[in-house]
Image (cartoon, coloured by chain):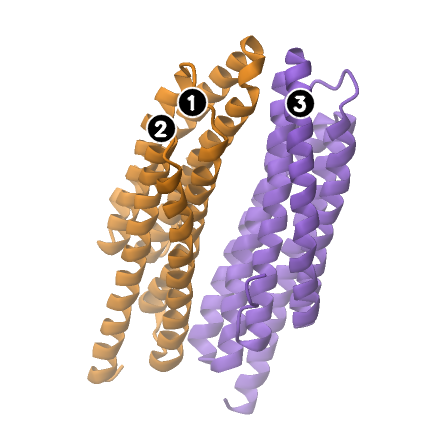
Chain colours: A purple, B orange
Amino acid sequence: MAEHTVKAFDEDITRLRGLIAEMGGLAELSISEAMQALIKGDEELAKGVVARDKQLDALEAQVDALAIRTIALRAPMADDLREIIAALKIGGVVERIGDYAKNIAKRVGGIDRRGPFEPMTLLPAMADIAASMVHDVLTAFAARDPVLALEVIERDDKVDAFYDSIFRNLVSFMVENPATISTAAQLLFIARNLERIGDHATNVAEMVHFAALGTYPPDP
Amino acid sequence: MAEHTVKAFDEDITRLRGLIAEMGGLAELSISEAMQALIKGDEELAKGVVARDKQLDALEAQVDALAIRTIALRAPMADDLREIIAALKIGGVVERIGDYAKNIAKRVGGIDRRGPFEPMTLLPAMADIAASMVHDVLTAFAARDPVLALEVIERDDKVDAFYDSIFRNLVSFMVENPATISTAAQLLFIARNLERIGDHATNVAEMVHFAALGTYPPDP
């Protein structure tokens, strides 16, 4: 590429990374606020999380448009093209991570907070790990760090272990307390949403690995 | 583009469409076999669905590689570039639709089939609509048909209505029959997986609309 094209390309890719970082920050905030809303029964906070989803959709559309424009105008090759394609796919996944957070927030109104629910104490810990995966995988993308990406992939086992434990816990709780079934079902879905967030952060980590090295990490 | 480049580009895009059609066919088959496995309690059939997921992963990687190669070698502009980007994103979504079918298949072993479960009769009807959405949206992609894409988007309301009805149904069932809670929880997740398949088919429909017309359909 001519020098001015290289510079323009660098600016485009920097903006693309900036948009993805912004999306990641919003998604992370949504996870943490959705969980706070759940624990406190704060329906206003939950509504804010639901409203934020539109912002994520708009940012994803911006990522798509900028990626397509960059490819069309700069005709990048090899590594650069791979990086733009990765940004395009990562934008899509972060948007879906936001969807899961929205989904958690939407369930806040359906939770009956009377009575101590052991899963209620496990869910925030699970959410913290899932949110840290989202945070770290976007750091890995920004820093082109495949080692941190692999570390995120390993962390998903912890999220899965939480999920299994919460699932068993909630089912026994439902059997013993049929009056709580509706709330327990909501909590089951929330645990499942967190488990999916971990899976999606893992997908992003695989794309970061691909963008940095040109190969997908081996299946564990 | 020079004439030979145009021809090479057309061949690439035809192969790309062929790969997406192949992925769609496998995803549709997985939905239908997962539901058959569920209804009959056929764990061997369920295992086949789980195994098929590797094929979908491999096809998605082929779509990615071919799309990147086509962009790099042919430097397509405007409509053509938009179509390749759409194929890239649609490949990712169809792979996730396959994941939901795999997820349903994995739950087959955890279902206790004794006793009549009304949701068991609703789930196959819900699955048929979701599978028809996947089928039709890929037809819409192959035919560049934004009208059929819009029709698929409308059909998602039916899937959502089924989901709400099955959810209420299962929760009352659990309250009345605590012994069935574990099975009912599995069926809840299956209903949720089908609902997500409908959502993903809707996402693909939006991308088909975008590839064909350059705009996303208005929010309903």
- Separation of marks 3 and 1 at Cα, in angstroms: 20 Å
- Separation of marks 3 and 2 at Cα, in angstroms: 25 Å
The residue furthest top is B176
**Residue A109 appears at what percent x and percent y?**
65, 22
Count of marks overlaid on the render: 3
Tell me the number on the disc at residue B113: 1
- The amino acid on which the numbered mark 2 sits, given as a three-letter code, is Ile
**Residue A195 appears at what percent x and percent y?**
62, 43
Quarter of the rendering occupied by the C terminus of chain B: top left
The residue furthest front is B44
- In the visual, does A94 lie left or right of B151? right
Secondary structure at badge 2 equals: helix
Q: Is residue A50 in view from this perspective?
A: no
**Residue A123 appears at what percent x and percent y?**
73, 36
Do dots 1 and 2 share one subunit? Answer: yes
- Compare residues B186 and A198 and report the one nearer the observer: B186
- Residue for point 40% across, 63% down: B58
- The amino acid on which the numbered mark 1 sits, given as a three-letter code, is Arg
Q: Which residue is mark 3?
A: A172
Tell me the number on the disc at residue A159: none
Do dots 3 and 2 share one subunit? Answer: no
Q: Chain of mark 1?
A: B
Q: Which residue is mark 2?
A: B39
